[in-house]
Image (cartoon, rainbow, N blue to C red):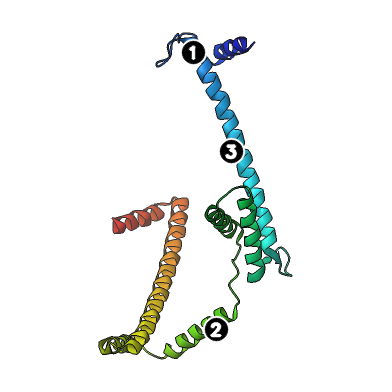
Amino acid sequence: MAQQTLTAIASAVAPSAVVSISGFDSIDLARETLFDLGGSTYKAEQLRNEGELLLSKCDANLYDIVTMPSGEPGKRVSIDYAEFMLVREFHIAGAVDKLDSVTAAEKRWERQIGRISNGLGFVRPKSESKDAVRKAAAKAAEIAKLAEVGDGELDDLKSVLLAKGDAKSVREAQKLIKEIDRRNATELDAAKAQRKAISDKLIARVKELAKAGTEDADSLLISALQMLS
């Protein structure tokens, strides 16, 4: 029966003029090998599709667990940090129970959190420990204290402190370096946002001109291309 099935399928899909396939000793061997390969590939894709569907369901379930209704229709917010860490502990323990290593289970957790963050907009809760709150308040106070100091003056103060070379001066200089880096990063982000806004406007304008298809629109497009070349 299997041989009849092979013959029937081969007759239906293979050109009758082909009497051999390179790499096989006979057309019968090629037929049987490719028949098995086709079936195995089908099963593998089915398993992959089933796995991807199950993984999506797992991601959705985790999202529902690490978020809660915000009070606004259709909007959810993350649970607090302590609950989030307990969910993480149970999640990792479940993987380890299946003979997974702790390191691999932790990485899998991070991948899943990454997927629901990117795909579903989950925002990971931050630690609310007294130490974390204290550090955050101290950092905010330090930034506010240095806000009145200009960039040039800040750089001069850093140089003076580094020139002194003692431990206290170096620590103070490191704070100034962090503030300089923070300001530079803010400026870079602002410049990046401005470039994106300009780029979006240009793209929108090019689309309008291309859609118009008039002579003056074509002339503007050609002029723009010449300027960019």
Q: Quadrant of residue 113?
A: bottom right
Which is nearer the eye, 134 or 105? 105
Asked if the residues shown at circle 3 and circle 1 are in contact, with their CB atoms under 8 angstroms apart, the answer is no
Pointer 2 residue? 134
Please count the marks in the image: 3
For marks 2 and 1, the one nearer the N-term is 1
Residue contact at pointers 2 and 3, CB within 8 angstroms: no
Name the residue that disc number 1 marks. Answer: 29
Can the viewer see residue 87 in this picture? yes
Residue 24 locus on image (x, y percent): 43, 14
Tell whether label 1 touches label 2 (CB within 8 Å).
no
Q: Give the amino acid at mark 3.
A: Arg
Residue 61 lies, with reference to residue 5, above or below; the image says: below
Q: Is residue 80 visible?
A: no
User: For the N terminus, which image quadrant?
Assistant: top right
Upstream in sequence: badge 3 or badge 1: 1
Q: Quadrant of the C terminus?
A: bottom left
Query: How far is disc 2 from disc 3 in space, using C-alphas?
Result: 48 Å
Question: Residue 118 vs residue 226: left or right?
Answer: right
> Which residue position holds label 3?
48
Q: CA distance from mark 2 to mark 1?
A: 74 Å
